[in-house]
C-alpha cells in the first residue's frame, strides 16, 4: 500500500482532509504543518502521495517537490488562480473549494498509479554478469561467423531457442558455444 502524507500550513486543514480520506477507507500515515516534517515522514516510507497546499510555513510547493524522495507524487490543493501558474510542473492539482468526491477519486487514481509503478519496477530484469554476457556474445559471434547471420538475427535466434526450450539466454548461449566449438 502506498503512503499518504498530508501537509498544510494550518494543521486544522490537514486534519479535515485526513478525516475525509479516513471516512473513505484511506489510511493516512502522517499529518504535518511544515515541509520539513513532511519530508521526514516521506523519507521513512517507500513511496506514495503527498497532499499539500501551495505555500507552507517553511517553503513553497515547488521547493518541496524538488526535495521529495523518489516514489512520491504530489497532489497540490490551491485556488484556481494559483493553479494556473503551476501548469506543466508535473504535479496533480485540485482547485479550491475542494469537493470530497474529487479528492477521494484523485487520491485513489494516484495510489493506483503508484502501486502499478512499484509493481513494474519490481519486474525489471536483473543485470547480467560480465561472464554471462561474454557467453551470449561468444554464441552470437559463432552464429554470425558460421551461419552468416547479422548481429540482430543471431540475437533473435538465441532468444527464440531460449523460449522454445524453456532455458535462459545464457544457458542457450552456452549450448550453442559448446556445440559449435567442436
Image (cartoon, rainbow, N blue to C red):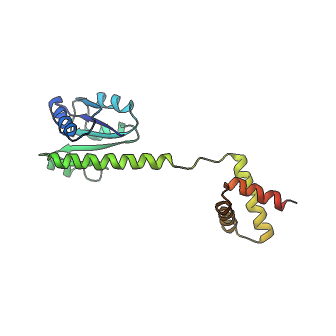
In-front residue for pair 53/17 = 17
Q: Is residue 168 above or below residue 38?
A: below
Q: Residue at x 38, y 31 (%)?
A: 43
In-front residue for pair 149/27 = 27
Q: Residue at x 75, y 67 (%)?
A: 144
In-front residue for pair 51/18 = 18
Quarter of the figure with the N terminus: top left
Residue 5 figure quarter: top left
Q: Most extreme residue toward the right, as rendered?
A: 182
Q: Is residue 94 above or below residue 28?
A: below
Q: Most extreme residue toward the left, as rendered?
A: 97
Q: Is residue 83 left or right of residue 180?
A: left
Q: Position of residue 18 (x, y in %)?
A: 21, 35
Q: Position of residue 9 (x, y in %)?
A: 19, 31
Q: Position of residue 30 (x, y in %)?
A: 28, 30
Q: Residue at x 67, y 54 (%)?
A: 168
Q: Residue at x 65, y 62 (%)?
A: 159
Q: Is residue 147 left or right of residue 69?
A: right
Q: Is residue 1 above or below residue 172?
A: above
Q: Is residue 95 left or right of residue 50?
A: left
Q: Position of residue 26 (x, y in %)?
A: 26, 39
Q: Is residue 83 left or right of residue 73?
A: left
Quarter of the figure with the C terminus: bottom right
Amino acid at each position: 500500500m502506498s503512503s499518504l502524507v498530508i501537509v498544510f500550513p494550518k494543521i486544522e486543514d490537514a486534519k479535515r482532509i485526513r478525516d475525509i480520506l479516513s471516512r473513505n477507507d484511506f489510511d493516512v500515515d502522517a499529518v504535518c504543518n511544515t515541509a520539513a516534517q513532511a519530508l521526514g515522514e516521506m523519507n521513512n516510507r517507500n513511496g506514495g502521495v503527498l497532499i499539500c497546499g501551495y505555500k507552507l510555513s517553511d517553503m513553497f510547493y515547488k521547493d518541496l517537490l524538488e526535495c521529495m524522495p523518489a516514489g512520491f507524487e504530489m497532489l497540490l490543493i490551491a485556488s484556481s488562480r494559483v493553479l494556473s501558474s503551476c501548469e506543466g510542473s508535473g504535479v496533480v492539482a485540485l482547485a479550491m473549494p475542494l469537493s470530497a468526491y474529487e479528492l477521494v477519486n484523485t487520491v485513489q487514481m494516484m495510489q493506483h498509479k503508484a502501486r502499478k509503478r512499484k509493481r513494474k519496477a519490481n519486474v525489471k530484469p536483473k543485470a547480467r554478469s560480465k561472464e554471462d554476457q561474454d557467453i551470449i556474445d561468444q554464441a552470437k559471434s559463432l552464429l554470425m561467423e558460421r551461419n552468416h547471420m547479422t548481429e540482430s538475427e543471431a540475437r533473435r535466434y538465441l532468444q527464440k531457442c531460449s523460449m522454445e526450450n524453456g532455458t535462459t539466454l545464457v544457458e542457450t548461449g552456452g549450448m550453442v558455444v559448446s556445440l559449435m566449438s567442436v
